[in-house]
Amino acid sequence: MVRLRLRKVMNKKNNFRHSKILLVTPRFPPDVGGVAQAVWRQAQQLSNQGHTVSVWVNSPGLHPESPPCEVLRFRSVEETNPILILKKLEEAPPDLIHAYYLSATAHLSLELGKAFKIPVILSARGNDLDRDLWFPHKRSELLSWLPQAQGLSGVTQALTKKLKVLVPQNECIRWVPNSVDPLKFKPLPREKAIAKKFKIPTQGQRLGFVGELRQKKGEAILLLSFATLAKEFPELSLILIGTVRSGKDSELLKIFLSQNPELKNRIFHIPNQAPGDLPPLYAWLDGVLFPSLQEGLSNAALEALSCARPVIATEVGGFPDLIHTGQEGQLILPYQTEALIEACRELLKNPEQGKAWGKAGRKKIKAYFSPEQELQNWLTLYSEVLAQF
């Protein structure tokens, strides 16, 4: 019945294929991070489908090169003249407002939706619900915002279940995970030119971390675990790919290296790379580690699995959506250094098991986490919201 109703909606609203969609986000490339990547991917996919897409970014930053759609960037809602915002929306009112990251975009998007009678979808990404719900002032805001939205989505199954508990009367709540293109992120042979360019050791084994290294990603646990493993595996290296957050997180890395000078030549930092340059780097990793304390749905984990790399991750956020222990990788409890050490030890001693995990991980990505699947998930939710508005 649901499929039949959605088909009728799509047939009845043929102009949906050419709808005007406004995406509101706190981050957009060249900003780093999962939200920025997700909104860029969404804007690109919708534009390719013939929709007119605009992106509003409510944070300071650089303007992207060759964006897939119109992009308006303002410092913050508080520092922007509301008359200018309203005038911009009046010029070309969208059919739908889709806001990413609740605490940063929900209030603005819901007020605009009310003013112009436009349906609003709010997308929970991780900390914006898991963490903010525990802060009294933010909790009251969230509990007032969520029931006002016509549609809701969670990037993980856990977030989606939480939304359904908080807003049981809303029938348009869907799990819409991130995606990765398996044609771009695929297993590649190890190129010695890549190893030479980035000074990656070609001897021994290499564990890797990909993303922004910081406290919530398990930086301390990662470094302490490697220090133990390095004593047991003399040719083991740790490859850090991505940025290290400035401040206390970069200071922690400096302190760790100063206290463990023997590891300076075994830990290699590769700065943030364009997505297209990552697959040859993944090829050199014998395992990819995600010891996160908090997480949404890691784009880097999707990439690693798509490149058939074995993954070890904590049981937080969307990792359980991607990995079943012993099938696509291994899940461990967060905050547990010994658990990470033991999982890495098992992987390093059983490389064939790692290859099997990688193969299974890529198969799962192609089946459930492709861009085509993500786009269809969004179009289904958009159809449901527009049909009921």
Image (cartoon, rainbow, N blue to C red):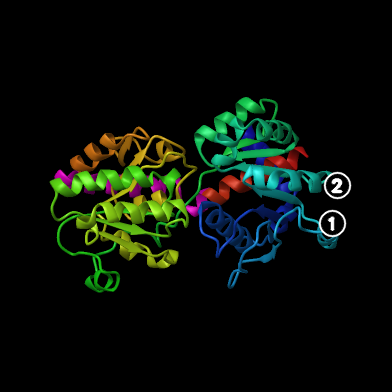
Residue 197 lies, with reference to residue 345, above or below; the image says below
At label 2, which amino acid type do we have? Answer: Ala
Locate the N terminus by quadrant: top right
What residue is shown at x 63% (from left), y 62% (from top)?
47
Q: Residue 356: within the magenta? A: yes
Horizontal and vertical percent for residue 34?
51, 52
Q: Residue 351: within the magenta? A: yes
Near-viewer residue (14 or 25)? 25
Near-viewer residue (193 or 168)? 193
Locate the C terminus by quadrant: top right
How many angstroms separate mark 1 from mark 2 (CA)?
9 Å
> Which image quadrant is residue 106 in?
top right
Residue under pointer 1: 86
Horizontal and vertical percent for residue 15?
74, 55
Horizontal and vertical percent for residue 302?
41, 50
- Taking the image as shown, residue 264 lies to the left or right of residue 146, namely left
Camera sees residue 306 = no
Horizontal and vertical percent for residue 170?
69, 30
Give SS at disc 2: helix
Residue under pointer 2: 115
The disc label shown at residue 98, or none: none
Q: Does the magenta stretch mainly form a helix, a strand or a loop?
A: helix
> Which image quadrant is residue 285 in?
bottom left
Residue bounds of the magenta highlight: 348-373
Camera sees residue 41 = yes
Give SS at disc 1: helix
At label 1, which amino acid type do we have? Answer: Leu
- Taking the image as shown, residue 42 lies to the left or right of residue 179, namely right
Residue 62 lies, with reference to residue 154, above or below; the image says below
User: How would you rate the neighbour count of disc 1 (Cα within 10 Å): few for under 14, some for 14-19, many for 20 or more?
Assistant: some
